[in-house]
Image (tube, rainbow, N blue to C red):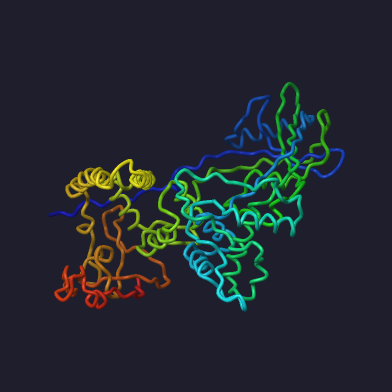
Amino acid sequence: MGQSPPRPFRRTGADRRAKEYWTIDANLAANKPPAFDARFLGKGDEKIEITNGEDAEKIRLALEKADWVVRSAEKKERRRNATPPFTTSKLQQDSSRKLRFSVKRTMMIAQRLYEGIELGDEGLVGLITYMRTDSTRVSAEAITEVREYITSEYGANYLPGSPNTYKEKKEAQAAHEAIRPTAAVRHPDQVKKYLQEDEFKVYKLIWQRFVASQMNPAVFDQTTVDIDAKTGNEVFQFRVTGSVPKFDGFLKVYKESKETEDEEDEELKHKLPPLEAGQKLTLKSLLPEQHFTEPPPRFNEASLVKELEERGIGRPSTYATILSTIQERMYAQKIGGKFVPTEIGLVVTDLLVENFKDIFDFQYTARLEEELDEIEEGKQTGNDALTEFYKKFAKDLRYAEKHMENIKRMEKPTRSTWKTSSVWRNPPTKSVSCAVRRWSSSGASTARSMPAAPMTRKIPTPASSRKRIPSICPTSTRPICRRLRKRNTAKTVAASWS
């Protein structure tokens, strides 16, 4: 029989064509310093998107002869509320962004802080509450304690009139409190000498977030200025927004990390002079700048955990495991801190999504969680939920048996006598050298380049050399004999990739 045709290599968002656009910033000066930059919005009351350099140059030439006048200057007070205490996902995200800790490392450190640290004469003390939670709930005793601490350490103006409360997500199980220090009065600096460096950093992060969650909002004076550039019968509109901190509030203790800068950060960069409607301005320079739209950035650990949480995939206890599994099975690898899918990851994903659409759906986990809640509440039985699931799964399984591509037949043997695909399909027991192969556009098999650094992997031996493990041990009623299971346990080895 002839070989199956090669699978097309799946394209990603990076292959899509970028879209060109231009911005024009005007550097302006008023009667008093400082000078400031305002951005072009449009012509008259119509917003205009500049899509090419020719249009940008025409607007620039017209603006050089324009008279610049402040149309309006609106001032208002803006408040920025405190963030809730940590849930598991938020701790993992903040630790990744601020401390550059992996999700797995963060959870290991948090586990040690929860289990207890020797604090001299105090003995073994658990420094934080349970670290696997999706709740922002805090006990009344802890709130009373932290409010007293805020008043004594920062002053009454930092304490809100009533405790801050935070809305729980619909799907939150709220089995545990939010992640917080067991005693708010135990300042990080007081326990620093008993902690390792990474333990101190994580504890400080948790302590700061919890204390800040019960403090007053930060207050800013925000000024939005609309500017007209008049030339002949044409009027071009520009705008600039600036913010000045008025009261630091919770920011005195903690500031939440972000993936990228937002409008608030941009506003704080703009320092504006006193401006009022009708005031004339002087043009100092114009800066047209070319840009191109970009695809969404690749996930790092923080952004992937955030996406999992928002889509309702997994639970607080499984985020770290999910990230570890996709790397251990080589479905994705981290390059420069970003997750990049491997070809085997793309192939496996395509096959499973195509043939098991009901299970490999973003909403599947969320729907399953809802069903489990209904079972707990007595609205449906467990057997009914399993029956409904298995009807669809059995149908998908029959379809897959007939239509799923046999990737194994498309592969070429490596230096080992067994097929490359067995690396991924069989239980690992022995170190071997292998190459993951892919099909080029011409149909020829070429070796896939792999990371140069040795990677810890579990690699199998051929099936013929593996011993059968009886389903029932002759000397025991246990499903699998512990002695045989221990003897046949897979060994973790370093695989050298061809």
Name the image quarter holding the N terminus. bottom left
Q: Position of residue 27 (x, y in %)?
A: 76, 41
Q: Is residue 74 above or below residue 10?
A: above
Nearest to the observer: residue 139 or residue 374: 139
**Residue at the extreme top:** 233
User: Is 353 left, or right, of 391 in this rendering?
Assistant: right
Decide if residue 189 is in sight here: yes
Q: Position of residue 345 (x, y in %)?
A: 35, 56
User: Is 32 left, or right, of 152 in this rendering?
Assistant: right
Q: Is residue 247 above or below residue 28?
A: below
Decide if residue 362 is in sight here: no
Name the residue rendered at 61%, 57% in the picture.
142
**Residue at the extreme right:** 31
Q: Position of residue 286 (x, y in %)?
A: 73, 40
Nearest to the observer: residue 265 or residue 208: 208
Nearest to the observer: residue 18 or residue 170: 170
Quadrant of the image occupied by residue 273: top right
